[in-house]
Image (cartoon, coloured by chain):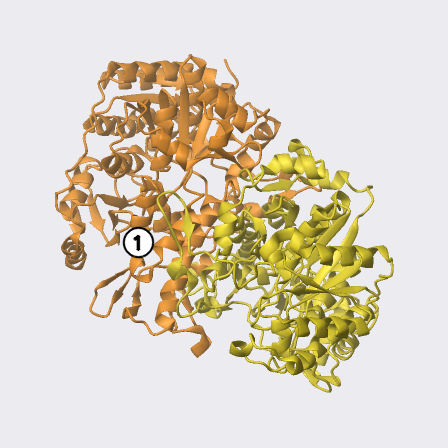
Chain colours: A orange, B yellow
Amino acid sequence: MPASQHTNPKTDIQIAQEAIKRPIMELAKEKLGIAPENLDPYGHYKAKVSMDYVKSLKDKPNGKLILVSAISPTPAGEGKTTTTVGLTDALNHIGKKAMLCLREPSLGPSFGMKGGAAGGGYAQVVPMEDINLHFTGDFHAIGAAHNLLSALIDNHIYWGNALGIDGRRVAWRRAIDMNDRSLRQMVSSLGGVANGFPREDGFDITVASEVMAIFCLAKDLEDLKTRLGNIIVAYTRDRKPVRAADLKAHGPMAVLLKDALAPNLVQTLEGTPAFIHGGPFANIAHGCNSVLATTTALKLADYVVTEAGFGADLGGEKFIDIKCRKTGLKPDAVVLVATIRALKMHGGVKKEDLKTENLKALEVGMSNLQRHVENVQKFGLVPVVSINRFSADTDAEIALVKSACAKLGVEAVMADHWAEGGKGAADVARAVVKAVDSGKSNMKLLYPDDMPLVEKIRTIAKEIYRARDIAIAKPVQDQLASFEAMGFGKVPVCIAKTQYSFSTNPDSKAAPNDHVVTVREVRLSAGAEFVVAVCGDIMTMPGLPKVPAANSIDIGPDGKIVGLF
Amino acid sequence: MPASQHTNPKTDIQIAQEAIKRPIMELAKEKLGIAPENLDPYGHYKAKVSMDYVKSLKDKPNGKLILVSAISPTPAGEGKTTTTVGLTDALNHIGKKAMLCLREPSLGPSFGMKGGAAGGGYAQVVPMEDINLHFTGDFHAIGAAHNLLSALIDNHIYWGNALGIDGRRVAWRRAIDMNDRSLRQMVSSLGGVANGFPREDGFDITVASEVMAIFCLAKDLEDLKTRLGNIIVAYTRDRKPVRAADLKAHGPMAVLLKDALAPNLVQTLEGTPAFIHGGPFANIAHGCNSVLATTTALKLADYVVTEAGFGADLGGEKFIDIKCRKTGLKPDAVVLVATIRALKMHGGVKKEDLKTENLKALEVGMSNLQRHVENVQKFGLVPVVSINRFSADTDAEIALVKSACAKLGVEAVMADHWAEGGKGAADVARAVVKAVDSGKSNMKLLYPDDMPLVEKIRTIAKEIYRARDIAIAKPVQDQLASFEAMGFGKVPVCIAKTQYSFSTNPDSKAAPNDHVVTVREVRLSAGAEFVVAVCGDIMTMPGLPKVPAANSIDIGPDGKIVGLF
């Protein structure tokens, strides 16, 4: 029996720090055929692929796209990113030419809770410290572009407000990549005439910025600029929208994002090329890495593995209905990640009892996985189930999962890339190749563009969450009608709700039915081109815990970091 | 007669965009003997010199240090940075091995007023667009470190406030690299229990952060961390200081600054190596590039040219009494930059009349230059006067300046690097080499460490600004006494006052006498290790003008930036 997540004595950062990394220029040349002049290095192990090179790939054929998604998350952890990394290493291990695309992690949370976002164990992307800190500066650039727009709004009001912005109806907050609850709500422009007109304001964490969502959906620099110009920043007293373009903000914002827009190339511990680029929130945004990274990777590799945020009901649905809808991307297979531990939690087992075999609870919990499988099939896609192995998993439990999946016509495969790297996920890789080669995936969108917005929300709630219906108050319906009147009736909807349940109650595990999804509020992301339906408490600025991770993060005189992850 | 600042038809950005740049790894190897493995590239034309390599230079002999300073600035412009660049190119032009050290420009102001901070004409540092935008991300890192500390303060209060921080006595604001007047003064933590305890707060521009000053004064990573830990962030109700180290913030802050701390290498248009690193405000901080850049450059070149902010009375004095005091650096010559236009403005000529010969006004204005010359000599240093040529300068005017300088025993040389690059400043370079070779510079600090703080302020006011005295109210004196009681009596003082005059009245041109310098307020920068004496209106968060530069900044689909500078 291989080592497992319980027996491996090394921490993620130890493994990452001990890794022998290949110079990224060499790796890019050898594995992807990209010449050094088409890369902008950031140190020796990170590089951006130049936008000119990206454009030059336009007419090359596309590789196959594999979407990694998961069951509804639990505190037991599922390992979706780890699987994305391990599976791609495994595809290379079995002789395929594969690369992966991930989201960039946010810097702020690194100082709150321990735990990075670059995989784990022997399925990691490196240099992990850089990736989890400033990386290539993309998020700082996104924050700067966001805050330039904020400054231009208040500056416009200050100097006479020719556009007639209603200070009570400014829809654009400020952004910072830090967990800082004290910035959630504030009154700004205090201190008298020289500082402007006082108004209510606040900061969101940078990943929650609409600039981030736009950055990740933009097809190229021009599309980026157009979308930035379309952002609705405020309304006038008579409720006419004011756009970023009205403030001439989109040009300088695009200038600030010019370098960031090029995909970031790094490598896995096994030397597999990886794009890590963009990282929008998965609740008020769509939660996938940049379109540019995914479309570029498809030109460079035969198999491209990418992931979506949260479970398949949220991130998976948004991947298809938001990211694929506008770009023509179509997955050729979907991997659903689960663990036996997490399925048992869905079956009602407490965290402290997870090491004990419990087939009954597992059977109950399987309903969660089964529903995600059905949902994936509803999109016309072929799912493969990948179970991250833990040492407490029993043979009977494994057999139960496999046979339940088989009944749905789906292959469930055990994976141990965490302990073994790519070869630990070789069976998953083979199952995925089989699913892709079957050619049976034929992606269908869940709803057409011209369905009314409220019906789009209802369709997702009923078809994917299996709700009885949605509840939506008259003022919220009116708001949707006003978005339609403004010409935004054809955009997709992005549901912001708890990721822990199919329902809006995070404690409702497994596969709840007959619930009602209440739409509390709707917001228009006119630049990103979607309408957000808020169906729960959504926090766009996290706080730090009582004992933040920062307390144990330190650096020696030699520059070695300790305590980070 | 050579081309001049009036006849050259190209803008700075055009010249910079047309420049043929050498790959920075090649240039570093050839001109400085630095191997690629000792550099971290950021694209092909920027690199950071690794800290291990910096340390390895410890025992090498130092080159000669040349400080570029200037007369009291006027709206006519003096061209200090341009001279720093041009002189260094000129030193190489006459066969010396020279490099330069500059401050990094702040990003925020790029969107306010037009004009970059990487030199001008044919005396520029490139890639100028990068340098003026995100560059290598140093300022973003400094902002993140600053704001992590801010978040940890409020988080500490939120979770029980074990240290007893008085929310009314928080001395640490927030930072952002943007011109945003609406963030100057605010009330944060609104919105109820979950968001903390409401209090007054505000943002400064990142260059005004004490983290920036510390970053620029730190000798190495360990010194940086110690100084960060010493920052006083707040006081308790009984006025005991609370330090960043009490919040365990200095470790993670240093982690965020680890990469930024390495000096940034770029090149001039003529391929001269240049460090551009750090950029503290010249009013509430000391206004020089990082100590690490300067000390490293001295190991790599025979002549190192660097500049200080504002005129010689402010930036020059701080360079010596703050930067040199703690590091042992000593300039071997000082270049004082002036223009005949600016001297005429000091003599009372209006901007629109500057093109007319006016020997009388010039003679009056010369008093400003003369006093700066005397001040430099007071520090035991040999000055050279470098006059940036404009096409309206007449022979009689030039003769007047030269003969007035000769009377002070100082060589005044005409410079035309703006139009001609290094060869345009060859005479300045020869004069500088002569001054350095004379060996007559023998730097003396203006005051000893153990002079009382109030006397240090008085000494600068009387000796350098030629004030009759200082005026300092009892509460401000008490504050200074309390700093001394806390153990900060031995630190230097950093005067924050208008740069436009020797007095505190910006309209008092030339060489005012007999004025009184009122010390309004004093602040302790315990990490940076100086006391700031505020003697005027000091703005630590600029605003944007009515028609901000942002309005005309744009980018084409090919990624070409227009309207920036």
At label 1, counting other C-alpha atoms closer than 10 Å, the crowd grade (few under 14, some 14-19, many 20 or more) is many
Residue B220: tell me if it is visible.
no
- Relative placement, left or right, of B401 versus A227 is right
Q: Quadrant of residue B492?
A: bottom right
The kind of residue on which mark 1 rests is Gly
Measured as percent of width and height from the top left, residue B43 is found at 53, 39
Measured as percent of width and height from the top left, residue B265 is found at 63, 44
Secondary element type, mark 1: helix
Residue in the picture at 81% in, 64% down: B382
- B205 shown above or below A540: below
- B236 shown above or below B132: below
Q: In this view, which residue lies farthest toward the front?
A: B1
- A476 shown above or below B383: above
Measured as percent of width and height from the top left, residue A201 is found at 38, 64
Residue B93: tell me if it is visible.
yes
- B265 shown above or below A412: below
- Relative placement, left or right, of B354 versus A461 is right
If the image is split into quadrants, where does the N terminus of chain B sit? bottom right
Q: Which residue does the numbered mark 1 point to in the structure image?
A: A229
Total count of labels: 1
Subunit ID for the residue under disc 1: A
Measured as percent of width and height from the top left, residue B47 is found at 60, 41
Name the residue nearer the viewer: B316 or B408: B408
